[in-house]
Amino acid sequence: MDEVEVEAGDVKREEDLAKCGCAGNGAVVRLLFTPRGRGHEGNEYYLADKENQCVACAAGSGLHRYSVVPHTYRKHLPDRLKSRSSHDIVLLCTSCHQTANCAAGVLSRALAE
């Protein structure tokens, strides 16, 4: 069985899924089932440390999430491309976010013609 240390109170427990206990300074959750695989094990993108900074200029404050593929277009994509992947969500500072929105508006108007 897999074990993971968590802060006390951070776990919602259901009797048939996990058992909670104490270990050291925190709680231990023992899963009562076997997960379907190892998540993103071996995938460097998901395992790499990521900084909370603007992807365009590396600013560390005033950050906003930006959808590279606008929701207006995303809803028309096939389900396999609309999966829960977060690759098209990036962090931009306020200035870069405004620049990206302006450029997206120009492209959107061009596509509408």
Image (cartoon, rainbow, N blue to C red):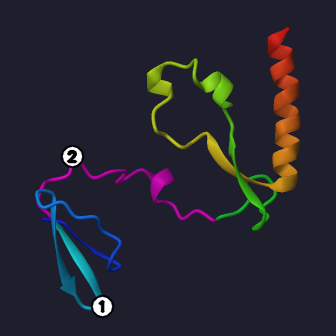
| Quadrant assignment for the N terminus | bottom left
Quadrant of res 19:
bottom left
Three-letter residue code for mark 2:
Arg
Rendered residue at 37%/53% (across/down):
42
Q: Which residues are magenta?
A: 31-51
| Quadrant assignment for the C terminus | top right
Q: Badge 1 is on which residue? A: 25
Q: Position of residue 67 (x, y in %)?
A: 67, 39
Q: CA distance from mark 1 to mark 2?
A: 29 Å
SS of the residue under disc 1: loop
* 93 on left or right of 29: right
Q: Is residue 36 magenta?
A: yes
* 62 on left or right of 46: right
SS of the residue under disc 2: loop
Rendered residue at 21%/86% (across/down):
23
Q: Main secondary structure of the magenta part?
A: loop
Quick one: label 1 or label 2, which is nearer the N terminus?
1
In the displayed structure, would residue 12 be above or below residue 72? below
Q: Badge 2 is on which residue? A: 36
How many marks on residues? 2
Rendered residue at 57%/23% (across/down):
75
